[in-house]
Image: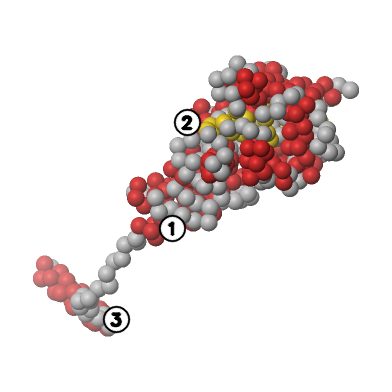
Amino acid sequence: MKKAKTILSLVLALCMVLALAACGSKPAEPANPNPAPVTEKTDQELADEVAALIDAIYVQERNENTDEQCAAAKAAWDALTDAQKELVEGEEADPDYFGRDTGDASKDDPRNGDEIGEKELLVVSFGTSFNDSRATDIKGIEDALQAAFPDWSVRRAFTAQIIINHVQARDGEKIDNMDQALERAVANGVKTLVIQPTHLMHGAEYDELTAAVENYKDKIPTIVVAEPLLGEVGDDATVINADKQAVATCVVNEAVKESGFASLDEAEQAGVAYVFMGHGTAHTAKVTYSQMQTQMNTLGYKNVFIGTVEGEPEETACENIIEAVSAAGYKTVVLRPLMVVAGDHANNDMADPEDPESWVSMFTASAKFEKIDTQIAGLGRIADVQALYVAHAQAAIDSLEK
């Protein structure tokens, strides 16, 4: 019996050998004596890949891949060495996108929570990626509104998706855009929605806001949009109102106090001029900047000048403001933003001494002045400005009862 099993095992082994031969098995090929070298990516190639990822999220439209794109851009940036990070340069990308220190994002509150209730106060801002300014200026306004209206749920929306993506990618903070915020209101069963824009005027951003709201008129029973900071625009440069007077008074008082003078008159006697830099716009609302200059003149603020980054209206362009301040005989200039937040425009377009096109550089290059100071502070952190937003929201709420 044992012998039979041994013979059977030999027969089976022979069959396996014959089967393998029949299948045409080939001997292993010799190793390639000259294998292709494994090429590593250069520092610039790695930096360019990150730049492309940043450019992909530097867009004004959110899409179904935005969250993944934001995470991918940050992960790729974190994988670079410090030297490689300095090489990041794209259509919009640069080392500052992730690398610039703009403050502690944890001090901010995106106010994107659910459990809203039936009454919501949605605060809509253009937005900023500068963390300190967002927490101080925008959150400052939101906090003031929540304190004034404790029975309302204060929520936030930004209109600039570019900024939303930047903050999300860099800091992991997710801020709702207008559609997300309005969809959140619908999903939470909001019955009354008051929208308080932090925009300066009835300009392009305000128009986009009201257009977005139209799509939700049949989804939320009651929606009302409050006035922006400076109120109604008016037809020409002579039109001023109580809102413009309030803003003019408080921003000048803050600037004078920060520069160490007891009054604007004392600063004027010392040869100091204050230049407030707004954004500027091609929108018909650009007359608002001219009206603010009228308001300063009406208040007797002869050493106060209104300019804009965009130079619209024309008389507000930097070179024209330089000439006006020089012609008036002032030798010291204090630059300060006429903007709700002290973000990119304030830090870069106004106050960056390394940028030859910044206002501080252009005023310096003119050689017409002995000293140029900058104050990087948004309107949103001023208590009187916050009170004005509260008043506008109250007026909108009161209109619901009429």
Residue that carries the numbered disc 2 in the rendered image: 104
Q: Position of residue 372 (x, y in %)?
A: 54, 34
Structural distance between the alpha carbons of marks 1 and 2: 28 Å
Q: Residue furthest right?
A: 402
Task: Name above or below for residue 84 compared with residue 4.
Answer: above
How far apart marks 2 and 3 lie (CA) works out to 69 Å
> How many C-alpha atoms fall within 10 Å of the one at disc 1: few (<14), some, or many (≥20)?
some
Question: Is 23 positioned to the left or the right of 161 in the image?
Answer: left
Which residue sits at x=73%, y=37%? 289
Name the residue rendered at 49%, 56% in the picture.
90
Asked whether residue 44 appears in the rendered view, the answer is yes
Question: Can I make out residue 187 in this image?
Answer: no
Residue hosting label 1: 48
Q: Position of residue 175 (x, y in %)?
A: 59, 37
Which of 20/336 is in front? 336
Instruction: Using the image as rendered, state which of residue 323 and residue 313 is in the foreground.
Output: 323
Taking the image as shown, residue 15 lies to the left or right of residue 373, namely left
Q: Is residue 370 left or right of residue 17?
A: right
Quarter placement of the C terminus: top right
Q: Amino acid at mark 1?
A: Asp
Task: Give the mark, 1 or 2, whose residue is nearer the N terminus.
Answer: 1
In the picture, residue 33 is in which quadrant? Answer: bottom left
Mark 2, secondary structure of its residue: loop
Q: Identify which amino acid the numbered label 3 is placed on.
A: Cys
Q: Is residue 107 left or right of residue 200?
A: left
Q: CA distance from mark 1 to mark 3?
A: 51 Å
Return the disc, 2 or 3, that comes first in the chain's sequence.
Answer: 3
Where residue 4 sits in the image (x, y, percent)? Answer: 14, 72
Q: Residues within 10 Å of mark 3 (few under 14, many from 20)?
A: few
